[in-house]
Image (tube, rainbow, N blue to C red):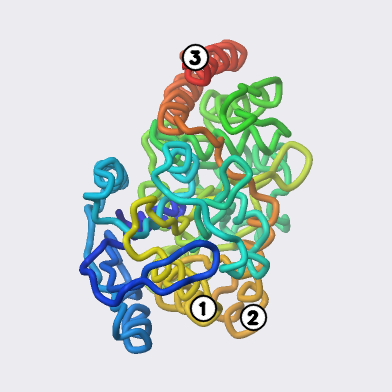
Amino acid sequence: MRWIRAAGRGLLVLAVVLAGYGASGAQADGGLRGRGPLTLATAGDLTGYLGPLLQGWNRAHPGEKVTLVELPDSADETRAQMITDLRAGERGRFDVLNIDVTWTSEFAAADWIRPLPRNRFPLGSFLPPVVDTATYDGRLHAVPYVTNAGLLLYRSDVLAREGLPPPRTWAELERYAKTIAPRYGLDGYAGQFLPYEGLTVNAAEAVYSAGGTILGDEGQRVTVGSAAREGIGFLARGVREGWIPREALEYKEEESRQAFQDGRLLFLRNWPYAYVSASARGSAVAGKVGAVPLPGPDGPGTSVLGGSNLAVSAHAEHPDTAARLIAYLTGERVQRQVLTRGALPPVRAELYEDPELVRRFPYLPTLRASILTAAPRPKSPRYDQVSMVVQAVVHDAMAGHRTPEETVRRLTRELAAISQG
């Protein structure tokens, strides 16, 4: 699966696959034993950064070499292949899985991945919210590898000409999108509103920013309420009043990025990769792009955490090597290369304040602020079903087929059926 050119889904997926039965298992702390060679499977390594990282590991660990293999580009196909392999039990090939953050609860609840000892990994060096994405039922079931949070991109040249700061609230965003954008021949605001995972993210951000939640108790309790009505109402009103263009109902990450980069939007919610792309040489808006945290009803809102986590298969033949590889990939030196070579947001906190990196990636302080106030998507062992319901119901509301009140009632009813199923 590709980093979606959006990193936002954070769906760069790795799977470490058993490649041989080399050096036998050595005793390791945390109850993990077994050392030997591994095969690391990834899909869509667009920047080619991973190969050099693994060469460093292989030079230092000749008896535990990692071979790189690619899986399909599609997130759904990659997830399906992982699940098929994990269900195969001892016949499975996968040792370590770098799973999307939303899969952690599902894989842990099914006992496909093993709990991990916290003391083997540098969790204290990570941005605090990212650790929550790797836990289920109070236990660590994976280790954060790449993180992400949504940002509001804006045309800095337009706002500067108007003498205005970037919006901090929904009311300011709405007012600018209604009044300023048309004067410059621009559409007002867009996100990712096609009914797919991106819409689940955008909807969750709207609900969270309004102070609400969707599920509680690891997916066992539906918590949709008035905040959901306010958040969904904000998105639906934008389409109804025209400051969100109707074509945005068909946007995924790339379509929305292209619209902004081509100079057609005043504001865009997207992942940091879109800032990098829009600011690059050849972009119609290069040098005219700013980024701030997502706005909310009364001030900065709440982003959803994206990214991926590294987990060890319950049937891994060499779990000690797998754990040590995870520690290597989440170390400071490698995490720096994840950013500089892979253009992926690292999980280590100190990198966001490194002067050299901030000069090269000026959005890092804003991204750090967004991550520190971000929240994970609803945790549930049936997350795929939850997401499909949210997508369908919210898209109906934005298309004008249901009122926000009707939408919240339907959302509550359908999510309750999943939780009780």
Which numbered tag is attached to residue 417? 3
Q: Residue at x 35, y 84 (%)?
A: 61
Q: Which residue is mark 2?
A: 354
Q: Residue at x 47, y 45 (%)?
A: 104
Residue 97: where, in percent of width, then height?
Answer: 37, 56
Mark 1 touching mark 2, by CB under 8 A? Answer: yes
Q: Which residue is mark 1?
A: 336
In the picture, measured across the screen, residue 28 lies left or right of residue 369, that is left
Residue 48 visible in image: no
Q: Nearer the viewer, residue 189 or 184?
A: 189
Name which residue type carries label 1: Arg
Mark found first going from the N terminus, 3 or 2: 2
Name which residue type carries label 3: Ala
Task: Classify mark 2: helix, strand or loop.
Answer: loop
Task: Classify mark 1: helix, strand or loop.
Answer: helix
Q: Residues within 10 Å of mark 3 (few under 14, many from 20)?
A: few
Mark 3 touching mark 1, by CB under 8 A? Answer: no
Residue 92: where, in percent of width, then height?
Answer: 24, 51
Residue 311: quarter of image: bottom left
Mark 3 touching mark 2, by CB under 8 A? Answer: no
* Residue 192, above or below 15: above
Mark found first going from the N terminus, 3 or 1: 1
In the picture, measured across the screen, residue 72 lies left or right of residue 189, that is left
Q: Residue at x 42, y 66 (%)?
A: 33
> Which is closer to the viewer, label 3 or label 2?
3
